[in-house]
Amino acid sequence: MFGIYRWLEGLEDEDIQFIKRLVLSSGSLKDLAGQYGVTYPTIRLRLDRLIQKIKIWDSAGPEEDRYVLFIKSKALNGEIDARIAKVLIQEYKKEKGE
């Protein structure tokens, strides 16, 4: 969809809003923590997870399946257990004959 910006496909609206706020706060995680009403370590963790999510999508080759990337992103967000994500990906690949 986005070609060289494929990593954007892996971001949710909430992620994009976070990036926007980060830029508007001149990269100050302390200011961002204040805006969200959370601690600095919480913002740092969110940023680290966002970076990992971007790396997953950015490093994927054109043949990388969107479903697999989606499952990896959900596991990274803690929305599903990493063990379950691995099983889902394995079963999906089996189904596709990979």
Image (tube, rainbow, N blue to C red):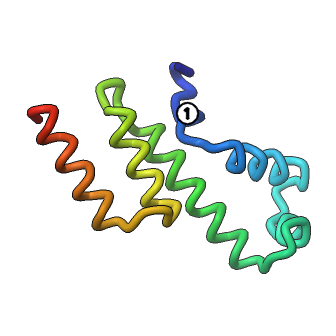
Q: Residue at x 52, y 61 (%)?
A: 77
Q: Secondary structure at mark 1?
A: helix
The quadrant holding residue 5 is top right
**Relative horizontal placement of residue 62, taking residue 55 as reference (left or right):** left
Note whether 79 is above or below 73 in the view shown.
below
Label 1, residues with CA under 10 Å away: few <14, some 14-19, many ≥20: some
Q: Position of residue 8 (x, y in %)?
A: 59, 34
Note whether 43 is above or below 9 in the view shown.
below
Q: Residue at x 52, y 29 (%)?
A: 6
**Relative horizontal placement of residue 26, taking residue 17 as reference (left or right):** right
Q: Residue at x 46, y 40 (%)?
A: 57
Note whether 51 is above or below 16 in the view shown.
below
Q: Position of residue 26 (x, y in %)?
A: 88, 53
Q: Position of residue 86 (x, y in %)?
A: 26, 58
Note whether 48 is above or below 23 in the view shown.
below
The quadrant holding residue 98 is top left
| Tag 1: amino acid | Glu
Please give the residue where the numbered disc 1 appears in the rendered image: 9
Q: Residue at x 90, y 48 (%)?
A: 24
